[in-house]
Amino acid sequence: MFFEKNATLLKEFSRVSKTAGARADYVQGGGGNTSVKLSDGLMAIKASGFCLSDIEPDKAYAVLDGAAVREFYLTSEPDQFENVETAGSTKAKESVKTIEGLAQLRPSVEAGFHSILKKFVVHTHSVYANLAACAVNCKEICEAAFAGADYSWGMVPYVDPGANLTFAIRNELRRVEAETGKVPSIIIMQNHGIIAHDDDPDACLALHADANERLAKQFGITGDCFPKVEIREVEEGLYEAATPYLTEALAKGDYTEQFLLEQPLYPDQMVFLIGTFSMDKDTVEEGQCVADSKTGRVLMRMDAKKAQVLAETLTAVVFVITNIKAAGHPLSTMGEAAKNFIANWESEKYRKSLAGKKG
């Protein structure tokens, strides 16, 4: 009954997800998430640990009572709760629905902000959006990028993923609508990524693409210039990043292990590199990624899918830093409190544990 009733919307949800998920410049590994509002107040959202490209009309997503989650965020204030993050996650867990024929999966931790947006939502960790989002002067870059756009936009400073982030986005939606008369179609999240939303699936994808192109242009590049990221197996279980852009950048000596691990730009950099990435070690242990600072060669002893995620993540980080510096903007890195939150965040450990397990 559920699948039949929502067949068209679920098909579009899968298409939108696969379109965004097909590009490593938009999402690396299991990063980003998508959602769709269904009948009867329900919401389908990408399951934690899955890739956008995994989503089919009957798999790789969770279903929640989206209307209940939405009401929670639209009628509450953070200071009402002793622990707002616990309150938000409890509401999300209570709202998960069991659907016959659909695996019971864990919804994205960002289900909260999806619930307060329009019918189709695309949230990615696009390298072009993160050029602006990881620059100190993000707001000024966005103002220049979106000048003349026929849609409005908003921006939130870095907020740890969860309930507080949803409230921050809610407040920005209200602020921009009050100022412009339009709900912002694009939200830039500092040190995180971008959100596009619309009631039409193609309009949602078009907004996302246009915003990325506009942001890339501010850095003198186009929204499709991210290098192709490939890996090759050099022996059983050992992969090499076959991406000249990454190899050449690391060989220049500008990216030290300390810099890449201790001054992260965004959560995915921490989640996928800390505890996994190092430089100039003689051997590559199981589950590890080692780069040679002299040659730039990157070796990864893990399964192919995890190696691909590591190569994409490293290349994205290097791409973002290189282009921000080339444009003369100061880098915005995550603060100590944010780093500690992500490092100890159970949801991200869960997501990392699933990376590479999905076919």
Image (spheres, rainbow, N blue to C red):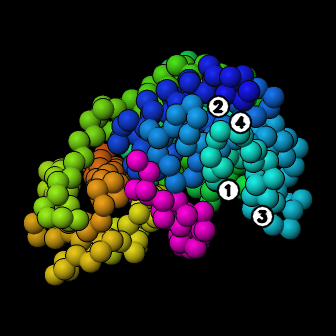
For disc 3, the marked residue is: 86
Q: Nearer the viewer, mark 2 or mark 3?
A: 2
Mark 3: amino acid: Thr
How far across and how far down the image is residue 162, in percent?
67, 56
Q: Which residues are magenta?
A: 330-359
Mark 4: amino acid: Met
Lower position in the chain sequence, tag 3 or tag 4: 4
Q: Are marks 4 and 1 in contact (CB under 8 Å)?
A: no
For disc 2, the marked residue is: 36
Label 1 CA crowd tier, 10 Å (few <14, some 14–19, many 20+): many
Q: Is residue 263 magenta?
A: no
Q: Which mark is residue 43?
A: 4
- Nearest to the observer: residue 60 or residue 180: 60
Taking the view exactly as shown, the residue that stands out farthest to the left is 295
Which element type, helix, strand or loop, lies under badge 2?
Answer: strand
The image quarter in which residue 197 lies = top right
Q: Residue at horizontal 74%, vertical 45%? A: 98
Lower position in the chain sequence, tag 4 or tag 2: 2
